[in-house]
């Protein structure tokens, strides 16, 4: 029998029908994916299950009995908890207090000793005793660790059903792996897990069944994940082929012949932006990729004058530029589509017309409004964005769907005909149809010679929409490369926060300290090599690339080792640069890159199989090193 | 009505978003229209129950009475539009009045006016700077200024009222043009200027945007800091203007002058449909609010209702007005 069943759920927000007769069922011991594009209604459905919002109509059955929860508290009591990306923890309290918070809120005396023992037991159960202690303060934990605390909180409540709402948005690949392992073990112990995500590779990695939502309707219900193909799932989510969304109408990706419009060098605006460099040319879309918290939004806010840089330079059209306020930036020809539409973009009491012309007002120096002077531009823009002028201009902004609002905000940035357009998560909370028209608009803007910078935490979107990609990690730009050279997995490795790549970095350092030469973490694919990290600067052991580099393999100094059997040192034909490569793979067998060592001269006491074992052991892999696979180049 | 084209928009459930220009939606969107209907209704009721209400003399009297509160309510409207509040205006009428009275004994009248206005604007500037850049709640800062202002009024005047004011001062409220008192004409001129400012200048729209969503206004490049300060400066300045007209009416200046007027001014703005959260309100609505309040007070006087009951009546009107406004705007926001 199903643990949880939902039948015919309807929910409407204002003019937006978020759910139309949605149904869902969850069995004990399974991980059930709830997928859909932005705005498909998956968050609404999961928030209905967790009691955060109530459906307009429909039925929820828990263990076959009708469930009526009046709020999240009732849902928790019924054994349903949600683990979100923005955690609901109290940062100033300890791990123990946070885990036991619902208990603390109940009447009666507390037995702290018992609570502590229980918390220890729970932490042990999820195998985190060595990193998570009950007395740690939550504010000192990483985002991944905080999520663990959320999960512990759910377990302390004895939740049978745990909803994971986009849990990996801020996690490095390593942390995500760890989370998936934990999810599996929870499912094995009989919990029912709902996994909300739009990352396909994660869905295939961890879930048992998939339910797909599109435009508030269920288009596929409870299909077994292993029977599905990636393309099929995309078609279900999108209703058409994914390539169509990012359709570039015959335009090639690489278009770097334009003049450099924006050049950012070593920009620093602590704590989020530490050392960011990149450039954008006219007519080019640059994707600024990275995990949540990598400093992407803060970087473009600094360019736009919303934050003041501490050091580094910004050049606009080759001249030094510094915006003291957004007004300076707008006047210099920069447009911004901010991340938080409700908070940073929409003036709710203004009509659509005034919202559209708000940046015009900001840039204007005369005392009067001068709305008339932009009449033609506004009309042309509305037509291009397929927005109905008559119905729109005098209406209230809040009467429209997220997609429509986003188009208006995009138009606001365009009214002033900018040379540089900064877009921060331009498709967040936007339905799939509008999403593709925003992409199309973006490409047209770029074709007209505007330099565009797009920030997105959706790797697929960044790769699909950009010509080139700059990757940020923990406030540092780690790579800048053409979009067609990179895929989601490699982007994930570049974007891994330094704090979590620390383990790898530390190990590279130890290897260099012990044996000399250079050590690096990289991936090799499609004839190219992508370097995520490198330690050691011995010129005689130079592998021919640096961190963030992506040379063709043939052009590096270790081409001889790539493709050779692993577990041994390989020398170049001239006998130089003995190199050991150790491929690292995740628990489900997918590649996590390659750790390599290159020497000027082979160290006397070097034992290649032992070092291979040491590397695999250090990175937590227990796979048999004798299991020979060749590194595919 | 333009039909929606393409799957992109028809998929998003854009039904019913088109504004139907029915009377109800007009009423729900136009504060001015709503308020003028309320004013007419109040006048109709009062003229029915009291034959004296709609007489020439009573009306003239009401026009004159509206001036001081009206001037303060104008400044208060700007402050409330940005989501702030100015509790100090009553006290500032007191202290700027004393500045005026003391100066009149030493300098020519126009210079004395200048001192009085400068004192008001300076107090407003202090309010605005501390609220905007010191990030202290407007309620707290202006509450403090309210206490400081009243105290300074006593200190400067030695707690004595000032009389022996020049006769020319009285002309400001005694003269009339085409039977309309000059001071009322000044009030209307101020409101007309303010209406133009709020609806047709960048500064005015900045105040609305600031009150509605300050962060969005900042991102759009509007000078929110400057205009936030200026709103308080204008409010302080209007206290000085009000002090001048108050002195011209009673030809005597008392350090206790203006006491309690801040509440009347705030009440007028709120009755006039402005939201205390900022972003919504209209200067015309405020003017109507001033008159609704005056009419009700006047009507109660004419009907010989005990003055002790007036507070209850006015208080109830304020609460009902805000409740009605909330319900109406709630209906509008739900679309």
Image (tube, grey):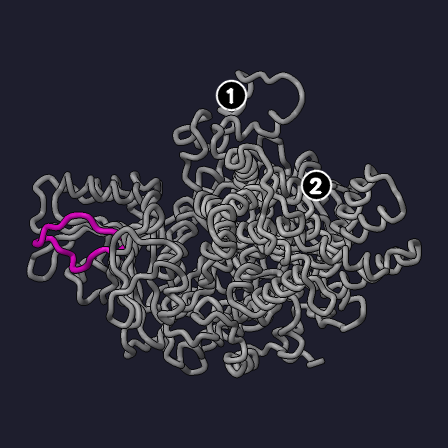
- The mark lying in front, picked from 2 and 1, is 2
Q: Which SS class for mark 1?
A: helix
Q: Position of residue A470 (x, y in %)?
A: 33, 62
Q: The residue marked by circle 2 belongs to what chain?
A: A
**A287 to the left or right of B17:** left
Image position of B284 with respect to A135: above or below: below
Disc 2/disc 1 C-alpha distance (Å): 29 Å
What residue do we see at 10% from left, 39% from top? Answer: A605
Task: Give the residues drawn in magenta, as a range.
Answer: A531-547
Q: Position of residue A492 (x, y in %)?
A: 38, 55
Displayed quadrant of residue B96 = top right
Quadrant of the image for the N terminus of chain A? top right
Image position of A206 with respect to A95: above or below: below
In the picture of the structure, the residue carrying the numbered disc 1 is A116
In the image, is residue A533 part of the stretch drawn in magenta? yes
Quadrant of the image for the C terminus of chain A? bottom left
In the image, is residue B196 part of the stretch drawn in magenta? no
**B75 to the left or right of B308:** left
Q: Which SS class for mark 2?
A: loop
Label 2 close to label 1 by CB (< 8 Å): no
Q: Is residue A350 visible?
A: yes
Q: Position of residue B51 (x, y in %)?
A: 92, 57
Q: Position of residue A264 (x, y in %)?
A: 28, 62
Q: Which mark is residue A71?
A: 2
């Amino acid at each position: 029998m199903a643990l949880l069943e939902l039948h015919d759920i309807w929910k409407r927000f204002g003019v937006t029908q978020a759910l139309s007769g949605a149904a869902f069922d969850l069995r004990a011991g399974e991980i059930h994916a709830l997928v859909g594009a932005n705005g498909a209604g998956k968050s609404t459905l999961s928030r209905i299950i967790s009691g955060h919002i109530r459906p307009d109509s429909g039925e929820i059955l828990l263990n076959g009995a009708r469930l009526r929860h009046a709020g999240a508290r009732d849902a928790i009591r019924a054994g349903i908890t949600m683990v979100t990306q923005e955690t609901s923890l109290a940062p100033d309290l300890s791990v123990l207090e946070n885990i036991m918070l619902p208990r603390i809120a109940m009447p009666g005396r507390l037995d702290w000793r018992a609570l502590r023992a229980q918390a220890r037991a729970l932490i042990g159960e999820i195998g985190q005793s060595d990193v998570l202690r009950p007395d740690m303060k939550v504010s000192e934990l990483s985002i991944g660790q905080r999520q663990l605390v959320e999960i512990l909180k759910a377990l302390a409540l004895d939740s049978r059903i745990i909803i994971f709402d986009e849990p990996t948005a801020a996690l490095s690949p390593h942390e995500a792996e760890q989370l998936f392992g934990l999810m599996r073990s929870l499912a094995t112990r009989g919990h029912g897990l709902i996994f909300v995500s739009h990352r396909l590779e994660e869905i295939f990695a961890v879930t048992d069944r998939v339910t797909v939502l599109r435009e508030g309707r269920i288009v596929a219900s409870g299909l077994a994940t292993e029977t599905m193909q990636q393309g099929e799932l995309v078609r279900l989510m999108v209703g058409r082929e994914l390539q169509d969304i990012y359709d570039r109408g015959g335009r090639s990706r690489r278009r770097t012949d334009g003049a450099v419009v924006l050049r950012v060098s070593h920009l620093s605006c602590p704590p989020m932006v530490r050392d960011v460099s990149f450039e954008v040319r006219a007519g080019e879309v640059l994707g600024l990729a990275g995990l949540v918290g990598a400093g992407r939004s803060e970087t473009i806010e600094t360019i736009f004058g919303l934050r003041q840089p501490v050091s580094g330079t910004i050049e606009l059209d080759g001249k030094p530029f510094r915006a003291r306020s957004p007004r300076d930036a707008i006047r210099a020809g920069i447009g911004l589509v901010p991340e938080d539409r409700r908070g940073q973009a929409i003036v709710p009491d203004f009509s659509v017309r005034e919202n559209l012309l708000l940046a015009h007002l900001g840039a204007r120096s005369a005392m009067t409004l001068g709305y008339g002077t932009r009449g033609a531009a506004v009309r042309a823009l509305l037509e291009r964005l397929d927005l109905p002028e008559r119905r729109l201009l005098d209406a209230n902004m809040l009467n429209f769907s997220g997609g429509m609002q986003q188009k208006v905000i995009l138009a606001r940035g365009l009214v002033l005909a900018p040379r540089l357009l900064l877009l921060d998560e331009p498709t967040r909370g936007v339905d799939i149809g509008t999403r593709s028209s925003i992409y199309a608009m973006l490409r047209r803007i770029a074709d007209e010679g505007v330099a565009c910078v797009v920030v997105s935490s959706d790797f697929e979107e960044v790769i699909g929409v950009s010509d080139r990609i700059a990757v940020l990690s923990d406030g540092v730009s780690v790579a800048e490369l053409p979009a067609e050279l990179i895929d989601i997995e490699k982007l994930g490795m570049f974007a891994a926060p330094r704090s979590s790549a620390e383990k790898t970095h530390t190990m590279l350092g130890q290897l260099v300290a012990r044996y000399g030469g250079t050590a690096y973490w990289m991936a090799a694919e499609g004839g190219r090599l992508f370097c995520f990290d490198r330690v050691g600067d011995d010129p005689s052991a130079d592998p021919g690339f640096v961190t963030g580099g992506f040379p063709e393999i043939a052009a590096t100094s270790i081409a001889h080792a790539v493709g050779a059997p692993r577990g041994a040192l390989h020398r170049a034909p001239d006998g130089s640069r003995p190199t050991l490569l150790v491929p690292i793979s995740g628990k489900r067998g997918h590649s996590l890159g390659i750790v390599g060592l290159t020497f000027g001269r082979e160290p006397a006491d070097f034992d290649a199989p032992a070092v291979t074992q040491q590397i695999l052991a250090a990175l937590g892999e227990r796979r048999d090193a004798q299991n020979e696979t060749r590194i595919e180049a | 009505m333009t039909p929606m084209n393409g799957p992109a928009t028809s998929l998003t459930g854009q039904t019913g978003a088109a504004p139907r220009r029915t009377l109800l939606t007009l009423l729900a969107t136009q504060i001015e229209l709503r308020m003028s209907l309320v004013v007419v209704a109040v006048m109709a009721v009062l003229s029915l129950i009291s034959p004296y209400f709609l007489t020439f003399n009573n009306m003239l009297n009401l026009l004159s009475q509206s001036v001081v509160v009206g001037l303060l309510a104008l400044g208060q409207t700007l402050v409330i539009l940005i989501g702030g509040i100015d509790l100090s205006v009553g006290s500032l009428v007191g202290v700027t009045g004393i500045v005026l009275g003391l100066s009149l004994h030493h300098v020519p009248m126009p210079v004395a006016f200048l001192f009085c206005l400068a004192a008001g604007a300076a107090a407003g500037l202090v309010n605005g700077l501390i609220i905007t850049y010191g990030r202290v709640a407007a309620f707290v800062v202006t509450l403090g200024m309210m206490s400081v202002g009243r105290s300074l009024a006593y200190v400067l005047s030695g707690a004595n009222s000032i009389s022996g004011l020049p006769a020319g001062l009285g002309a400001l409220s005694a003269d009339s043009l085409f039977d309309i008192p000059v001071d009322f004409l000044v009030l209307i001129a101020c409101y007309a200027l303010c209406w133009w400012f709020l609806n047709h200048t960048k500064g005015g729209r900045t105040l609305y945007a600031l009150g509605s969503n300050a962060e969005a206004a900042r991102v759009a490049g509007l000078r929110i800091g400057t205009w936030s300060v200026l709103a308080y400066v204008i409010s302080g300045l209007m206290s000085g203007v009000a002090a001048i007209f108050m002195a011209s009416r009673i030809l005597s200046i008392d350090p206790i002058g203006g006491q309690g007027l801040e509440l009347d001014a705030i009440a007028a703005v709120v009755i006039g449909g402005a939201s205390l959260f900022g972003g919504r309100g209209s200067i015309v609505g405020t003017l109507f609010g001033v008159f609704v309040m005056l009419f009700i007070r006047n009507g109660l006087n004419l009907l010989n209702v005990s003055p002790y009951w007036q507070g209850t009546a006015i208080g109830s009107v304020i609460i009902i007005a805000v409740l009605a406004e909330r319900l109406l705007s709630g209906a509008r926001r739900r679309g």
